[in-house]
Amino acid sequence: QVQLVESGGGLVQPGGSLRLSCTASKSIFSINAMGWYRRAPGKQRELVADLTSDTSINYADSAKGRFTVSRDSSKNTVYLQMHNLRPEDTAVYYCHAVDYVATRRYDYWGQGTQVTVSS
C-alpha cells in the first residue's frame, strides 16, 4: 500500500507559477514510478509528467518547456514545478504511483489538488 498526499494547488494568474508536492508513505526509491496526471472539466484524465525509478522522465507535449518534475528522496516527495501557466492548465492534478509486488502491478492515486489559472 502506498498513500499519496498532495499539496500546492490554488488560483494563479495566467503566466504565473505553482509548485505541487506529493509525499508518499514509503520510500520513493522502492516505488517503480511516480508522476502527475490532470483532469480538466469535461475532459478525460491525462498524463502530465512521470518519473521512473531509473530517473527517466516523460512529459506530455503540453508540459514540455513549462513544467518540471523532480523528486526529493529524503522527503519521499515528488514535485511538479509549473511555470507560464495558461487557462487551459486549469484542472484537478493527481499524483500517481506505480508499485509492483512480485509481478503484480498496483496503481495508487492521491486525492487531487485543484489548479485554477484565471485572471
Image: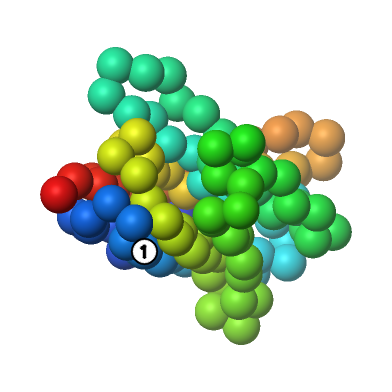
| Residue 46: x %, y % from top left | 51, 29
Q: In the image, what residue occupies the spot 27% across and 24% down?
A: 41
| Residue 114: x %, y % from top left | 26, 46
Examine the image and state in which quarter residue 15 appears: bottom left
In this rendering, would 66 be left or right of 7?
Answer: right
In the depicted view, which residue is nearer to us: 97 or 21? 21
Q: Can residue 116 be spotted in the picture?
A: yes
In this rendering, would 44 be left or right of 24?
Answer: left
Q: In the image, what residue occupies the spot 57% across and 72% down?
A: 76
Examine the image and state in which quarter residue 92 appears: top left
Q: In the image, what residue occupies the spot 33% across and 29% down?
A: 40
Residue 18 against residue 52 in the figure, above or below? below
Q: Can residue 34 be spotted in the picture?
A: no
| Residue 99: x %, y % from top left | 68, 46
In the depicted view, which residue is nearer to us: 51 or 13? 13
Q: Residues within 10 Å of mark 1 (few under 14, many from 20)?
A: some
Q: Residue furthest bottom?
A: 74
In this rendering, would 61 be left or right of 88?
Answer: right
**At label 1, which amino acid type do we have?**
Ser
Q: How many marks?
A: 1
| Residue 65: x %, y % from top left | 61, 53
Q: Which residue carries the number 1 mark?
A: 17
Q: How is the image coloured?
A: rainbow
Mark 1 element type: loop
Q: Residue furthest left?
A: 119
Residue 37 against residue 13 in the figure, above or below? above
In the depicted view, which residue is nearer to us: 56 or 95? 56
Q: In the image, what residue occupies the spot 60% across and 76% down?
A: 72
In the depicted view, which residue is nearer to us: 22 or 106? 22
